[in-house]
Image (cartoon, grey):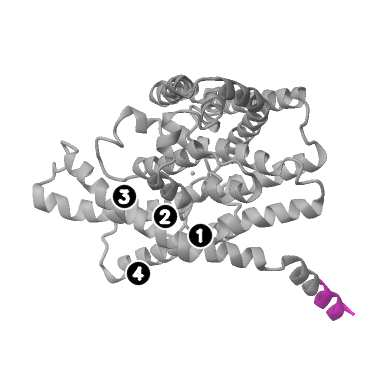
Amino acid sequence: MRQEKLSYSREVSKASPTYFTALDGFRGVLAIMIAIYHTMWSSHLNNSQFWENGPALVDLFFVFSGFLMFTLYDGQINSRTEARAFIKRRFARIYPLHFFMLIVALLYAVARLVAHFVGLAVYEPGEILPFQAGASDTLWSFFTNLTLIHSMGVHDALTYNMPSWTVSVEFYTYFVFAAMMIWARPKKAWHFALLALAVGVNYYALSRVKPNIDFHYDLGFFRCLGGFFTGVVVAYAYRNIKPLYERVKARAHVQTFTFWASVLEAVVLAILVGFILYGSGKAQFFLAPVAFVFVLGFAFDMGLISKFLGLGLFRYVAKISYSIYMVHILFSLVFAIFIESTMPSITGPSWDTSQFAGDAFLIPYLACVLVFSHLSYHYIEMPGRKALNAYDFTSKWQRLLSLGKARQT
């Protein structure tokens, strides 16, 4: 599931005076919600109707990403050199933590083999161990993860760190975006109308071959394209509505404006929640208009919900949201193994019937995810990003080419 998990506070503040408080806050909230959705034991939350339709939440990350990328880079990518610089920044943003978690997942796969070899683990009927025929975690899938092509239709299952499928598809979506900005940059209203039409056709085509929006390793790239370019259309609408919004806000009484703005935000949030609750099956492919309303409704930071999401706690969670998204599956797995191996012997085989025990485990689970995400952000994400941004790939590549030609002669 990557969606572009950027902190609006980090990206926007450097290139624009605009800070999207609510969208940044929602980014952190969504990361926590997805961490709950991926828990591997029974609780009241992950068995609720809302979390049953949880996959649609991932697509909001794609929409956020398209909105932010167009807001930041419209008019800034005009040549191949600028496109390469853009791709390098995005690569530096996503790859260090992806690589780290890939190595962690590889070590876990090896640990499974060792545990079975020495007798610490019991072979279950039908179980396929890593690197065996039919396994999803193989040397080939390790290579595809290294090159970020692992969810571009080359496998028939999720591999290694499963949420990283979004990193794969979004990275190559950046290439599509950069190409559009160089050769077919949308400027006029009818350009964005065509883009919106293309998004609709994309979702319609996907709805003809998939029962719902919960797919990833095969057609996930097209799922990402739909969300990302929905965000681009939202960015255009935001840009054109903002002057009118500023005039209305300047003329309105502060308390009256805040009241009605808060009502509007509540309605917009209710639309999204209603869609997640009741939009199952094919209905999930109507995500684009719902996401359009949601992102546009909160992009202006005009009501009390936006102010609430601007609290320090939400800003902190938003800052580490990419880490939350990338590391949570590891802790979900560890907690599931611990729970399944200890709880039946303590309270009996029906320990999870009421699901309250599962609810209790959510607290330490999320605490571990947040603490580790804080550490990975400061000691993996940020140092890795700085190192890759500072590395001169062009000179290194030219030097390698020169050495190759010299050897040939």
Secondary structure category for the residue under label 4 = helix
Q: Residue at x 15, y 51 (%)?
A: 343
Q: Mark 4 and mark 2 in contact (Cβ < 8 Å)?
A: no
- Which of discs 2 and 4 lies nearer the camera? The answer is 2
How far apart in space, not on screen, are marks 1 and 4 (Cα)? 26 Å
Instruction: Report whether 272 appears left or right of 83.
Output: left
Q: Point out the image quarter for the C terminus.
A: bottom right
Q: Which residue is mark 4?
A: 114
Image vertical order of residue 47 relative to residue 1, above or below? above
Q: Which residue is mark 2?
A: 327
The magenta region covers 401-409
How far apart in space, not on screen, are marks 1 and 3 (Cα)? 19 Å
How far apart in space, not on screen, are marks 2 and 1 (Cα)? 9 Å
Q: Which residue is mark 3?
A: 366
Secondary structure category for the residue under label 2 = helix
Q: Position of residue 115 (x, y in %)?
A: 31, 67
Secondary structure category for the residue under label 1 = helix
Image vertical order of residue 144 relative to residue 305, above or below? below
